[in-house]
Image (cartoon, rainbow, N blue to C red):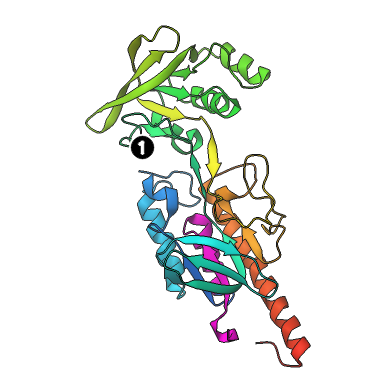
Amino acid sequence: MSKTDVYDLVIVGGGPGGLTAGIYAMRAALKTVLVEKGPAGGQIMLSDEVENWPGTERIGGAELAMNMANHAESYGLETRNQEVTAVEPGLDVHTVRLDSGESIAAYAVILSTGGSPRQLNIPGESEFYGKGVSYCAVCDGFFFRGKTVMVVGGGDSAVEEALYLAKLAKRVYIVHRRDELRASRILQQRAMNDRNIEILWNSVPVEIHAESGAVERVTLKDTQTGETRDMPVDGVFIFIGFQPNNTVVPAGVKLNAQGYAVTDAKCETDIPGIFAVGDLREKYARQIVTAAADGAVAALAAAHFVETKKATEADSCGLPAQ
């Protein structure tokens, strides 16, 4: 394989982290290709509106995604609309394999494959996502100020989000399948002491209903009696877990107990030259802005890694670095 066939950087995933990494990589003059199996923008393509992107009070998710993609492409970023099936680390270069049977060799790889909220898989959930169904209270809670919402789940995340929503909404119902929450005791006490929160025990949602494209009620089933009832609500927030899309993460990369890639401050994994950003990476907050920040950090770190790698190769051959 000729060195001219080797990319400096392959970015796997075209969400906010991947696109930002593309912008910074091109500004660093790295020979870069971004591979994304779906539309550019990732999950923000499914958000009707985004109100927490700095400098922009309100913007449609699809518009923000397009702006990011156009910005990256304005620097000449090469993109491929294909699926990555494997990332194979190497001593000299890493190999990214595609579903077409092709492979791409690169000195560095940035994994920006994101993550996915666990779904209830009930009627109305996917149909009304972004129209009353949400998986992020911080992202969408503002739209339900003064309204009635339902939070599904009983762990720390569900109760924390319910407490956040209680500051905005008129009424918050926490729906839990058992008669005791799994959240930490202090969170449980805060929820039970909040006048805007009511816990509906031994209940599970079985269908989400909407009129004119907006959620209006949820059918709940009693887990003990099997009886059903309808609860009128304006929004449904689902927090039954979140899973990183880590199927192409190489075996040598350390994952935490939840499956998130463990990195250092440069977003670099245990394998030199392989980075993880955004919702794939172990970190405190999962927001569009933090994913973009990860992308910038990883691209800058990748540029330094590639420059060092090339300089080392040139020294060993007695040639000037390219």
Q: Identify which residue is drawn at 60% across, 26% down.
A: 156
Single out the residue that lies furthest toward the top.
Answer: 225
Q: How many marks?
A: 1
Per the image, is 307 magenta? no
User: Residue tagged by mark 1?
Assistant: 129
Task: Using the image, determine if residue 284 lies above or below residue 154.
Answer: below
Q: Identify which residue is drawn at 39% across, 65% down.
A: 81
- Horizontal and vertical percent position of residue 216: 29, 23
Task: Using the image, determine if residue 195 lies above or below residue 29.
Answer: above
The amino acid on which the numbered mark 1 sits, given as a three-letter code, is: Tyr
Single out the residue that lies furthest toward the left.
Answer: 212
Q: Identify which residue is drawn at 50% across, 13% down.
A: 199
Quarter of the image that includes the N terminus: bottom right
User: Which region is colored magenta?
Assistant: 1-26
Is 90 or 51 nearer to us in this picture? 90
Q: Is residue 237 visible?
A: yes
Q: Identify which residue is drawn at 30% across, 36% down.
A: 127
Per the image, is 2 magenta? yes
